[in-house]
Structures are given as C-alpha cells and as structure tokens.
Amino acid sequence: MREDDNNDEQSNDADRTWLLSRILLTWGELTVVVFAGAILGGMVSGPPKLIISLGAALASVGVLLYNVDQLIQKRLSDIKTE
C-alpha cells in the first residue's frame, strides 16, 4: 500500500468522524431548542405562547443553518489545503 493511499484513507475516516460528530451535535442542539420552546410555551398562554413557538422555530432553523455553514466551511478549507 502506498503512503498516499494510507493518507487518503485516514483523511476519509477523519472526515466521516467529523461529519458524524457534527450531525450528533446538531441533533442535540435541536432537541434542546425544541424542548426549551415546549417548556416555555407550556408555561404561558395566548399571544406570548405564539411568540415563543415562533422563536423556537426560528432558533431551530438557525441551528440547522449554522451547522450546515460549519460543514461547508470545513469542506472548503479541506479543498484549499489539498
């Protein structure tokens, strides 16, 4: 096995590990945001409940976009270093 092949395999394993950790982190962050929104929304009623629900939805979209951005930045930095 050539040294380049070995480095490629290690790089692929590191990329997969980083991707898996980012997916798990995103899932955990979304779980926290949704449960926090549900708890806060359950404590109030009326217009504040609507505002809290919309805030939780906005926060969950923010979590998703942030983590997708991190994945894109990682991919671009990997391409630049190659």
Image: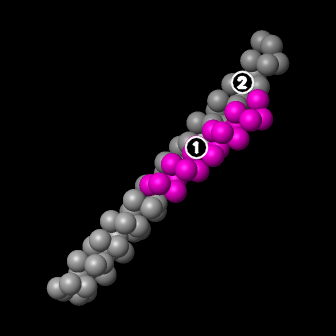
Look at the picture and state if 62 lies above or below 72. Answer: below
Residue type, label 1: Ile
Classify 10 Å Cα crowding around label 2: few (below 14), some (14-19), many (20 and above): few
Question: What kind of secondary structure does the magenta stretch mostly adopt?
Answer: helix
Identity of the residue furthest to the left in this view: 46
Identity of the residue furthest to the top in this view: 1
Residue located at (37% from left, 66% from top): 58
Q: Residue tagged by mark 2?
A: 8
Question: Which of 3 and 50 lies nearest the eye of the viewer?
Answer: 50
Q: Earlier in the sequence, mark 2 or mark 1?
A: 2
Q: Residue tagged by mark 1?
A: 72
Instruction: State which quadrant residue 48 falls in.
Output: bottom left
Q: Which corner quadrant holds the C terminus?
A: top right
Residue 67 x, y percent position in the rendering: 52, 53
Q: Which residues are magenta?
A: 64-82
Left or right of 2? Residue 10 is left
Question: Which of 41 and 82 lies nearest the eye of the viewer?
Answer: 82
Look at the picture and state if 74 lies above or below 36. Answer: above
Residue located at (71% from left, 30% from top): 10
Instruction: State which quadrant residue 27 falls in.
Output: bottom left
Left or right of 70? Residue 57 is left
